[in-house]
Image (spheres, rainbow, N blue to C red):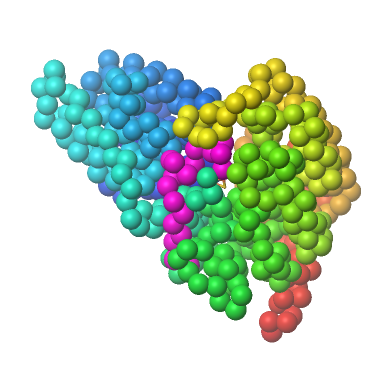
Amino acid sequence: MPKVYLRTFGCQMNERDSEQVAQMFVERGFTITPQPDDADVLLMNTCSVRDQAEQKALGNMRHLGKFRKRNPRLVFGMMGCMAQSRGPQLLEEVPHLDLVAGTQKYHRVVDHCVELMRAKEESEMDDLRRPIVDVEEEEGSQNTIRDHVAKAHGVSEFVSIMQGCNMKCSFCIVPYTRGPERGRPIAGIVEECRRLADQGVREVTLLGQIVNLYGRHEFPKIDGKSPFVQLLEAVHEIDGIKRIRFTSPHPIGYKEDVIEAFTYLPKLVDHVHFPMQSGSDRILKLMRRPYKASKFLEICERMKAARPGIAITTDIIVGFPGETEEDYLETKKAVETVQFDQAFVFRYSPRKDTPAAAMEDQLPERVKEERNQDLLALVDSIVERKNHAQVGTTQEVLCEGPSRYNAARLSGRTRTNRIVIFDGDAGRLAGELLDIHITECSGYTLYGASVMHPAKAHPALQMAETVGT
Ligand code: SF4
C-alpha cells in the first residue's frame, strides 16, 4: 500500500484542506504516514501570508529531496497558497519537485500523484521527471472540501463553508492565492455537520476568509437575515452539535443580524475572533480596510451587550508602511479600550505583488520589532489578568480528550475558548460538556476539577429549550 507524507503550514483553512486531501488519498488505497523517510509521496500544503512561512516550506521541501537517494521514484508535491502564487517558478526553486497544485486544485492532487507515480514507474532512470503544474481557476472547487478523514474525528472539527476573498486588503496575498469569494450551498454544509455529529463531533468551527460575508453573492437574504445567519440557524438545529464557532469575520459584514444571532442561538460560543488590524483610521485606509476604528469598537461594544462575558480576540499588524508613533498609539488605545482576551500581533512583512509592498515609508525592522514587543507586553498583561479572574469560577468545558502535553490528564475548552486541564476518564468524558471549577491559572492555561457531570445547560439554552417545548 503506497504511503503519503503530508505536512501543513499556515491557517485552519489549510489544515482543513489537507484533511480533505488526506481523505482522498485514503479512499484511493493510500495510507498516511507521519514519517517522510517511509513515504512514496511527499506533499506540502503551503502558506503565503508571511515570508517566513514560505521560506520554511521551501527549506523543508529541499531537505526532503535527500530521500531520493533511497528511492529515485518518489513523488514530491507542493500545494496551496505558495503553489498558487509562484506556479511553475517553484519547479526552478526546487529542482526535484514534481507537482505544483493551486488552491482550487486540492481535489485533483491524488489523480496527479497517481499519474506521476505511474509515469515514474514506466520511465527510464534518466527521464524520471515530468512535472505537473495545475493552478488554473476551477468553477465549483469550493464544494470539493467536504469530506473528513474517516475515524480520525475528534470532538471538534473544522468545516470549510467558503473559499476566497474579494476584499483586497493592501497587505494581503490571500485574494491572489485563494481567488474570489465562493460559498458552498447551505444544504451541503448542514449535511456535512450532521454527518460529523453522527460520528461523535460536538463542536464545529465554520471556516471562511471573511466568514460572515458567506454567500453574499450567491444566496439571497431571507427576512432580513444574511446567508451567514441563515447558515448559523440551520447548523444550530442539528441535535448532536453542542457548540458552534466561526472564524474569521470581517467588520464590514458584522451587521445587526449577526449580533442579534448571539441573543437567540445559545450554541454559538461566548467567543469571537475579530481581526482589527489597526486602531488608526489613517492606517486602516492605507490597508484598504473599509471601516473606521470607532466602528470596530462600536461592534465590540454591541457584541458585549448581546452576549455578556463574550471573549473577543483579534489580529493586529504593527509597523505597516507609514505607521507613525501616533498611529501606533491609536492601536494601543484600541487594545486598552476593548480589553481583548487574546491578540495575535504581527510585524508587517511585505508580500510580493501586494499594493502595500510597493508603498513608500516602509518602516525599519527595529521600529516594527519595538512596537511588536511593546504591544505584546500590553496584550499579555490583559490576558493574564483576565485568565486569573477565571480562578474560583465554574466554567462549562467541552472535554476534547487527553491533554496534548500530559496524556494522563484531560483537556477541554471553555465557551470563551480558554484551555482547561483537569482529571478524569477520557473514554467516558471526551465529547461531554462538563462544569469545571477553575482552581489555578498558569500563563494561557487554566486548571480545574469537575464539579458536575454533565454540565447544566447554558442559561440561554435552558431558556430556548423551555420556549421550544
Ligand atoms: S479580508 Fe483582507 S486580510 Fe482577510 S483574507 Fe481578505 S484580503 Fe486578506
**Is 148 above or below relative to 80?**
below
Q: Is residue 334 left or right of residue 94?
A: right
What residue lies at 74% left-to-right and 54% top-to-bottom? 295
Q: Quadrant of ligand 1?
A: top right
Q: Position of residue 106 (x, y in %)?
A: 35, 45
Q: Residue furthest bottom?
A: 469
Q: Is residue 97 left or right of residue 172?
A: left
Camera-nearest residue between 132 and 182 = 182
**Is 439 above or below relative to 118?**
below
Residue 59 visible in the displayed image: yes
What residue lies at 44% left-to-right and 61% top-to-bottom? 184
What residue lies at 26% left-to-right and 26% top-to-bottom? 74
Q: Quadrant of the C terminus?
A: bottom right
Camera-nearest residue between 329 and 312 = 329
The segment highlighted magenta reads: 169-186
Query: Per the image, is 147 magenta?
Result: no
* Residue 422, quarter of picture: top right
Q: Quadrant of the N terminus?
A: top left
